[in-house]
């Protein structure tokens, strides 16, 4: 069994660009205020999730290992 990631979107930072929905349409949705929401928050690790997080123009998406909380993205400075 592979890693599971916990996906969080900081909606105080999200600008509703929809890049996450473009890169991972099954993993994100925009609400009526154009704020991104992960669907669901815990899911199997996937390249498209990482691409969505990396593609967010304001870095509003955080990926952590479900269970341990170890940060996958963004990389620590």
Image (cartoon, rainbow, N blue to C red):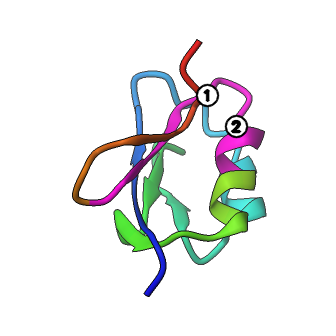
Is 38 magenta? The answer is no
Residues 72 and 24: in front is: 72
For the residue labelled by badge 2, is the local secondary structure a helix, a strand or a loop? loop
Answer with left or right where residue 19 lies relative to residue 10.
right
Judged from this view, the residue extending furthest toward the bottom is 1
Residue 73, x across and y down, in percent: 56, 38
Quarter of the N terminus within the rendering: bottom left
Residue 10, x across and y down, in percent: 41, 32
Residue 20, x across and y down, in percent: 67, 53
Q: Mark 1 highlights which residue? A: 59
Residue stretch in magenta = 52-66
Q: Which mark is residue 56?
A: 2
How far apart are labels 2 and 1 at the CA level?
Answer: 5 Å
Q: Label 1 near label 2: C-beta < 8 Å?
A: yes
| Circle count | 2
Q: Which mark is residue 1?
A: none
**Residue that appears at 67% across and 54% down:** 50
**Residue that appears at 72% across and 40% down:** 54
């Amino acid at each position: 069994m592979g890693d599971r990631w916990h996906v969080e979107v900081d909606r105080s930072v999200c600008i509703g660009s929809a890049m996450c929905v473009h890169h991972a349409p099954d993993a994100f949705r925009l609400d009526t205020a154009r704020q991104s929401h992960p669907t669901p928050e815990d899911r199997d690790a996937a390249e498209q999730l990482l691409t969505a997080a990396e593609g967010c123009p304001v870095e509003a998406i955080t990926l952590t290992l479900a269970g341990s909380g170890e940060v996958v993205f963004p990389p620590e400075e």
